[in-house]
Image (spheres, rainbow, N blue to C red):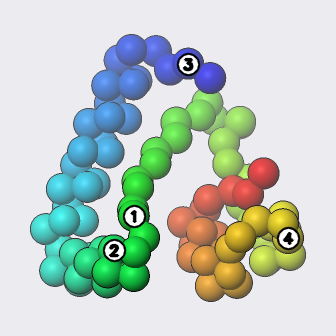
Amino acid sequence: MDLPEHLHHLVSELGDSLVKALSEDDHCRDLAFQIQAKGYGLMLILEASPIGMGPRILTNVEDADASLPFSEDDLRLMKSFKIRMD
C-alpha cells in the first residue's frame, strides 16, 4: 500500500526519532551490541495502515505460523508490541 507523501514523511521522521531514542538509551544500546556480537543485524520497520485494516493482535503463540523461524520468546515479544504474523 502506498502512503501519501505527507504520511510517508511523518512515518520516516518517527522512525528516525525512535532509532535516535533507542541509540541514546544505555540498556538498548547494550542489547543491540550483544545481538550484533552474535553475528546478527538489526532493522527497525514501521508500518502505517488505515484504521480498521491495522495489525491483528496475536491472542496466543499458536496463532503464529509454525513454519516461521521464531522462538516462543520471539513471538511473545512481538505480541507485546502488537506485531501481527500473517
Mark nearest the camera among 4 and 3 is 4
Residue 41's label in the rendered image is 1
N-term-proximal mark, 1 vs 2: 2
Q: Is residue 61 visible?
A: yes
Q: Which residue is mark 3?
A: 2
Residue type of the residue flagged with mark 3: Asp
Left or right side of 60 for 43: left
Q: Which residue is mark 2?
A: 36
Mark nearest the camera among 4 and 1 is 1
What element does badge 3 sit on? loop
The percent position of residue 28, horizontal first and vertical second, equals: 27, 76
Name the quadrant of the N terminus.
top right
N-term-proximal mark, 4 vs 2: 2
The percent position of residue 24, horizontal first and vertical second, equals: 13, 68
Residue type of the residue flagged with mark 1: Gly
N-term-proximal mark, 4 vs 3: 3
Cα–Cα span, label 4 and label 3: 30 Å
Q: Residue at x 31, y 25 (%)?
A: 9
The percent position of residue 53, horizontal first and vertical second, equals: 71, 36
Cα–Cα span, label 4 and label 2: 26 Å
- Circle 4 crowding by C-alpha within 10 Å: few under 14, some 14–19, many from 20: few
